[in-house]
Amino acid sequence: MGAGAGQAVAGQQDAAQTVIAARGLDLTFETGDGPVHALKGVTLDIRKGDFVSFIGPSGCGKTTLLRCIAALEEPTGGSLTVNGMSPDAARRARAYGYVFQAAGLFPWRTIGRNVSLPLEIMGYGRAEIRERVARVLALVDLAGFEKKYPWQLSGGMQQRASIARALAFDADILLMDEPFGALDEIVRDHLNEQLLQLWARTDKTIGFVTHSIPEAVYLSTRIVVMSPRPGRITDVIDSPLPRERPLDIRDTPEFLEVAHRVREGLRAGHAYDD
Amino acid sequence: MRHRVLPVLAVVAALVVVWYGAAVWLNAAWAQDRAARAGVELGLVELVADTWAQDKPKLPAPHQVAEEIWRTTAGQKITSRRSLLHHSWVTLSATLLGFAFGTALGIGLAVGIVHSRVMDMSVMPWVIASQTIPILAIAPMIIVVLNAVGISGLLPKAMISMYLSFFPVVVGMVKGLRSPGLMQLDQMKTWNASPAQTFWRLRLPASVPYLFASMKVAIAASLVGAIVGELPTGAVAGLGARLLAGSYYGQTIQIWSALFMAAALAALLVALIGALQRVVLRRMGMG
Ligand SMILES: Nc1ncnc2c1ncn2[C@@H]1O[C@H](COP(=O)(O)OP(=O)(O)OP(=O)(O)O)[C@@H](O)[C@H]1O
Ligand SMILES: [Mg+2]
């Protein structure tokens, strides 16, 4: 704990504060047919304001890593701090918003009341809740859908509502597990753009799991390439792209070069597999 | 609508035909007996007519039961001892009280079982064991014990109703309160929701469809409980009392009309819960 506090002080002096620090993180699931090494020796620093994407083949531990950060999973080895605290302390301090792979809206609540759910739980006042719900729903282009029930919305709209829900309270960290996985290309582009704008405006630190190389490259300041059995990091790529990113940046040589490197990293992981 | 009503009517018609046939078959012996004693020879038409019009038939014909029901409902003042509606009300009030107790007890136990491992391990086996004891064996004891401490009338019957109706509610509610998926529980965890918040905002609303499904079973069980509760003491009022009196005096028509009344009451109660379920689920946006 003392070391964590010291780190935080050093971080402030660097002006590039480490928000999430993993050192030799291990997680082994004991299952019926032997142990599964979901994470092995994962070491990673995520600084304040980073947009970090996790990419890798299915089963390489992306979700598991995100869940460890969120204190939904207990690592079996190594150390992990979030905001200089243990992940569980950070969870209790409501340090992050988490967007799950599926929208997971409550069917008995309207969209507006789904978004207000975490706010109610956190004890926000009535007027403040109303104001915030309206604001985040507008942010994800769902203004006017407050009174609708989840089943009245398309899958993509439901996913946007679940993102709005994670944005409704002031967490500095946003953890997203393949939030746009089920959406069509156009909607995905649009949401990617919006997510970047939001990130630029709010200076949140974002951890983002994806299977799409263009999406990872377009969004991230850092791309973490992972590979399975055991789940580990094989490459960390710092993006040379500017923070300001119009959609057509995807046709520039810099973009294609980063994408190429990510692809190489993924390939190397697969080769190890065989 | 037509394509739903027609098959139902066809089935009912078939049942009535079978019933009339059975009435002839079961009551013929008595008719022949009487005719023989009077020294008369019965033709087929007379025989059939006789089997459908006896005073104390083995199996009363449908129109006899219908007549009896009509006579004892529409034909009597509701407050009269002879009104079937009066007896129905006596049974219904015990049913409803027992159902309310049973539902409350069932929900309370389910909440405890879901939240406490100790209760899950210790209470659940008793809940299940309680239902393996035949109600007919335990009903007289409940009535007698409660009578001994000066409680009689409505309450002992309601207790037996409760005994039968809490079980489906416990089972249904435990399932319902446990129905939220791992992801929804994880979501609550990411917001650092307290157990109480998780209960009120996730578990309870998620359990509502399960609650209604089990309440439909429970209300029917409640009615059975109330009727059974009227048997051991030889109660003077209630559908159970009508059944008992009917069997003492061989009044099969009275027995059958009480049975039909009980069935109609059960159907009505289940339908009412079904209607309530539709209204509540629609208001919750899940209809
Ligand atoms: N609760 C669990 N119990 C046992 N094994 C698990 C559990 N959760 C994950 N695993 C295993 O850990 C490994 C990593 O899983 P994880 O879900 O993190 O992969 P992923 O990279 O998110 O995959 P995908 O891209 O398909 O979502 C897999 O082999 C998986 O089977
Ligand atoms: Mg995953």
Image: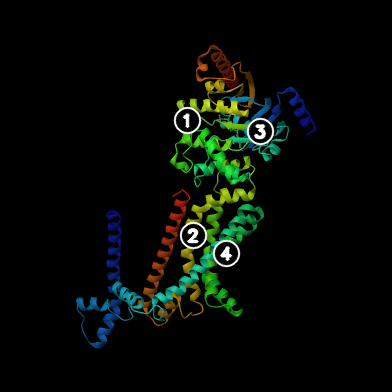
Disc 2 sits on a residue from what chain? B
Instruction: Measure the C-alpha gap from mark 1 to mark 4.
Output: 52 Å
- Discs 2/4, front: 2
* Residue at the spot of label 4: B130
Relative to A89, does residue B122 appear above or below in the rendering? Answer: below
Quarter placement of the N terminus of chain A: top right
The picture places residue A91, in percent across and down from the top left corner, at 67, 38
Which mark is on residue B215? 2
Residue B162 in sight from this viewpoint: yes
Q: Are marks 4 and 3 in contact (CB under 8 Å)?
A: no
Which mark is on residue A183? 1
* Residue at the spot of label 3: A69
Residue at 24 percent across and 75 percent down: it is B48
* Between discs 2 and 4, the one toward the N terminus: 4
- Discs 4/3, front: 3
Which mark is on residue B262? none
Relative to B208, does residue A58 appear above or below in the rendering? Answer: above
- Discs 1/4, front: 1
- Residue most toward the right? A2
- Discs 1/2, front: 1
Disc 1 sits on a residue from what chain? A
Residue at 67 percent across and 32 percent down: it is A27
Label 2, secondary structure: give it: helix
Relative to B137, does residue B9 appear above or below in the rendering? Answer: above
Q: Are marks 3 and 1 in contact (CB under 8 Å)?
A: no
The picture places residue A50, in percent across and down from the top left corner, at 64, 25
Instruction: Measure the C-alpha gap from mark 4 to mark 3.
Output: 47 Å
Q: Amino acid at mark 2?
A: Met
Q: Amino acid at mark 4?
A: Ser
Total numbered labels: 4
